[in-house]
Amino acid sequence: MIEKTYLKTKPECKVKFALPADKIGEAKSVAVVGDFNNWDSEANPMKKQKSGVFASTISLEIDTSYQFRYVLDGTEWLNDDMADAYVPSPISPDTNGVISL
């Protein structure tokens, strides 16, 4: 799930990335990675909410598109069903989600 909140005072958008418990399975850690954090799985760890959903909010520049994915337990990669588009990954046969702001 992706929620976009555009700021009126800055050229930024607060983007909330969230994964429901049924997508996570038994994973203990979840991170959102992408162009915005150099695909660093330690840069934006997602926090588990009381509902079981893992979520993280990141401020991103508007008028830009970013590729991203989720990493579960540092090994399993997932796309978000709510991504604006999908593009082929340059390093694997998978696709990356795209968010356009």
Image (cartoon, helix red, strand yellow):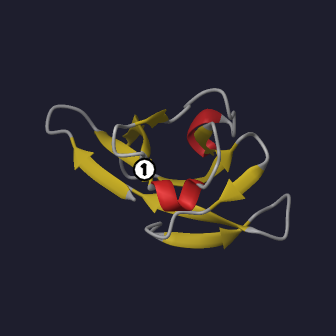
Q: Secondary structure at mark 1?
A: strand
| Residue 79 falls left or right of residue 2 | right
Residue drawn at x 42%, y 41% is 55
User: Residue furthest toward the top?
Assistant: 43
Query: Which quadrant would residue 15 be assigned to in this image?
Result: top left
Query: Which quadrant would residue 11 be assigned to in this image?
Result: top left
Q: Quadrant of the N terminus?
A: bottom left
Q: Nearer the viewer, residue 33 or 20?
A: 20
Q: Nearer the viewer, residue 19 or 27?
A: 27
Q: Amino acid at mark 1?
A: Ala
Position of residue 19 measured from the top left corner of the image (x, y, whole percent)? 47, 53
| Residue 14 falls left or right of residue 42 | left
Residue drawn at x 59%, y 39% is 31
Residue drawn at x 64%, y 49% is 26
| Residue 59 falls left or right of residue 79 | left
Position of residue 45 measured from the top left corner of the image (x, y, whole percent)? 56, 31
Q: Residues within 10 Å of mark 1 (few under 14, many from 20)?
A: many
Query: Which quadrant would residue 101 be assigned to in this image?
Result: bottom left
Q: Which residue is mark 1?
A: 18
Q: Nearer the viewer, residue 59 or 25?
A: 25
Q: Is residue 15 above or below residue 97?
A: above
Residue drawn at x 65%, y 70% is 87
